[in-house]
Image (cartoon, rainbow, N blue to C red):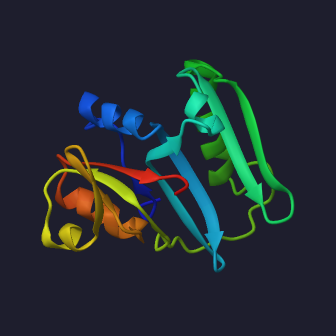
């Protein structure tokens, strides 16, 4: 769990949201997991998505899960969240099942190495250290847009600059 990069939205500002709107984008907190070279890239972070994408239209009390298969393409499932108590119960039950070696909904097939080296572009508002200055490709209001950089490296920047705000680009 400690290898999964996690960033929240507590530092987002109204000016950030205005800038995203100018570029026909919305910021959503997304969990992402994908297999890359037999390793898993897994992270949770604010993500900018086009207003044309289904993720942009998900209201606060609903959930959307999407998976993309090599052969099957994109599949999304949308529905209302279970609510505070049913969600908490199921999270605890899943943890108990894993602790007993049951797996979630199938048998455990071993663990995979986490590798958050895949690169993506980011919107960043905050202190521009030397590494970030070398990776700027555009300016958006008070923020900058980076060239593609590894997810792990961007989250390390955020740990070093906790007052900053980052948002990855979903598709660019």
Q: Is residue 136 above or below residue 161?
A: below
Residue 42 pos. (x, y %): 53, 60
Q: Is residue 158 above or below residue 151?
A: above
Residue 86 pos. (x, y %): 64, 22
Viewer-side residue, 98 vs 137: 137
List the single residue furthest toward the bottom. 37
Which of the 4 image quadrants contains residue 106?
Answer: bottom right
Q: How many marks?
A: 0
Q: Is 83 displayed left or right of 129 in the figure?
A: right
Q: Is residue 124 above or below residue 52?
A: below
Q: Is residue 40 visible?
A: yes
Viewer-side residue, 129 vs 133: 133
Image point (63%, 30%), residue name:
63
Viewer-side residue, 110 vs 30: 30
Image point (59%, 28%), residue name:
57
Image point (22%, 67%), residue name:
132
Q: Is 94 displayed left or right of 117 in the figure?
A: right
Residue 9 pos. (x, y %): 34, 38
Which of the 4 image quadrants contains residue 5?
Answer: bottom left
List the single residue furthest toward the right. 72
Image point (74%, 56%), residue name:
68
Q: Is 91 displayed left or right of 103 in the figure?
A: left
Q: Is residue 103 visible?
A: no
Q: Is residue 63 above or below residue 76?
A: above
Q: Is 1 displayed left or right of 37 in the figure?
A: left
Residue 10 pos. (x, y %): 29, 35
């Amino acid at each position: 769990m400690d290898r999964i990069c996690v960033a929240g939205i507590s530092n987002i500002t109204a000016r950030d949201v205005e800038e995203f709107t100018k570029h026909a984008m919305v910021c959503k907190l997304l969990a992402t997991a994908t297999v890359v070279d037999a390793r898993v890239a897994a992270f949770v972070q604010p993500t900018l998505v086009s207003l044309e994408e289904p993720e942009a239209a998900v209201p606060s009390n609903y959930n959307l899960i999407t998976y993309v298969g090599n052969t099957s393409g994109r599949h999304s499932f949308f529905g209302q969240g279970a609510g505070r108590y049913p969600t908490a119960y199921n999270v605890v039950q899943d943890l108990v099942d894993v602790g007993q070696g049951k797996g979630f909904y199938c048998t455990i097939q071993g663990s995979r190495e986490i590798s958050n080296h895949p690169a993506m572009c980011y919107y960043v508002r905050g202190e521009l250290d030397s590494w970030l200055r070398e990776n700027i490709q555009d300016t958006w209001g008070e923020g900058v847009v980076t060239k593609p950089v590894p997810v792990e490296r961007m989250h390390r920047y955020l740990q070093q600059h906790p007052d900053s705000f980052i948002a990855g680009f979903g598709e660019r």
